[in-house]
Image (cartoon, rainbow, N blue to C red):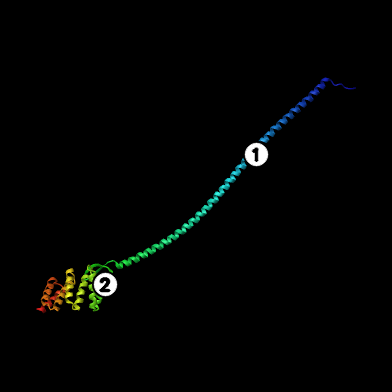
């Protein structure tokens, strides 16, 4: 016996099936919507990642370029430093060479200065004391005077006369003139040139009457007068000697000579 289901039960079942289908469609639609959103989110995320990656690549490239540039700059700087070191070393070497050359030049100048000083010292006047008189005389005139005196002491009166006569003519203001006149007169007296001897003795007295050789010059004049047979003149000269230079040895000799002349 077949069972006949009521219409209300069939309708209820259809509604349930339809409801299930609707729910399934809604779930499927929601799932599809969510997948699109996720897909877009993923795409957006990928774009961001790609953008960040691109930015990172650009930054890395920029950093690489900057590092490369800095490396080149450092290499250039290092080369410049090395060049500067070489230049400094060269300059230091040049400076040391110049210092050595300067030291050598200074040494040469010092040696030259000493040489010049020595030469000048041979030419410059020096203080001389002769017969109790101090005066300045250059080495040349001292040498000339001493050479003439050495010749006189050797007994070569002719040569001594020429040397002393030339000295007096060349150096009339020399401190050696008075002693040169004295020895010139004595050389002429030895050669019996009495008149010339008296002239030089008188010149001596005129130049320096207080000179230590002056009393001897007066006595020599008296001797020349006696040789010339001028006894009267000799007595007057001797008397003048005693009067002018009473304490001299020449005055003692003059007194003795006067006693013999009387």
Residue 6 in which image quadrant: top right
Q: Quadrant of the N terminus?
A: top right
Q: Position of residue 59 (x, y in %)?
A: 60, 42
Q: Residue at x 16, y 75 (%)?
A: 195
Residue 208 is at least partly visible in this image: no
Please tell me whether mark 2 sits on a helix, a strand or a loop.
helix
Q: Position of residue 103 (x, y in %)?
A: 41, 62
Query: Where is 169 relative to 7, above or below?
Result: below
- Of the image marks 1 and 2, the number of the one nearer the N terminus: 1
Q: Position of residue 185 (x, y in %)?
A: 19, 74
Query: Where is 23 relative to 54, above or below?
Result: above
Q: Tell me the residue that label 1 is attached to.
A: 50
Q: Residues within 10 Å of mark 2 (few under 14, many from 20)?
A: some
Please tell me whether mark 1 sits on a helix, a strand or a loop.
helix
Tell me: 168 left or right of 229.
right
In this orientation, which residue lies closer to the viewer: 185 or 3? 185
Residue found at the very far left of the displayed protein: 262
- What is the number of callouts on the image? 2
């Amino acid at each position: 016996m077949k069972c006949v289901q009521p219409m209300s039960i069939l309708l209820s079942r259809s509604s349930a099936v339809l409801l299930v289908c609707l729910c399934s469609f809604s779930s499927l639609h929601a799932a599809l919507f969510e997948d699109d959103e996720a897909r877009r989110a993923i795409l957006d995320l990928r774009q961001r990642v790609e953008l960040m990656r691109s930015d990172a690549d650009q930054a890395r490239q920029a950093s690489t370029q900057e590092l490369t540039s800095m490396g080149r700059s450092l290499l250039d700087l290092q080369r410049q430093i090395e060049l500067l070191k070489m230049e400094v070393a060269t300059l230091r070497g040049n400076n040391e060479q110049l210092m050595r050359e300067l030291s050598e030049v200074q040494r040469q100048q010092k040696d030259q200065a000493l040489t010049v000083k020595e030469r000048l010292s041979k030419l410059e006047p020096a203080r001389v004391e002769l017969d109790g008189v101090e005066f300045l005389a250059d080495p040349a005139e001292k040498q000339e005077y001493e050479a003439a005196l050495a010749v006189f002491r050797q007994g070569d009166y002719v040569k001594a006369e020429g040397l002393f006569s030339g000295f007096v003519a060349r150096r009339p203001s020399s401190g050696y003139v008075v002693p040169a006149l004295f020895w010139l007169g004595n050389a002429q007296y030895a050669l019996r040139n009495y008149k010339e001897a008296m002239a030089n003795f008188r010149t001596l007295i005129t130049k320096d009457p207080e000179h230590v050789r002056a009393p001897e010059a007066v006595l020599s004049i008296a001797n020349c007068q006696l040789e010339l047979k001028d006894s009267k003149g000799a007595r007057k000269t001797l008397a003048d000697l005693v009067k002018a230079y009473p304490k001299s040895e020449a005055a003692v000799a003059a007194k003795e000579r006067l006693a013999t002349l009387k």
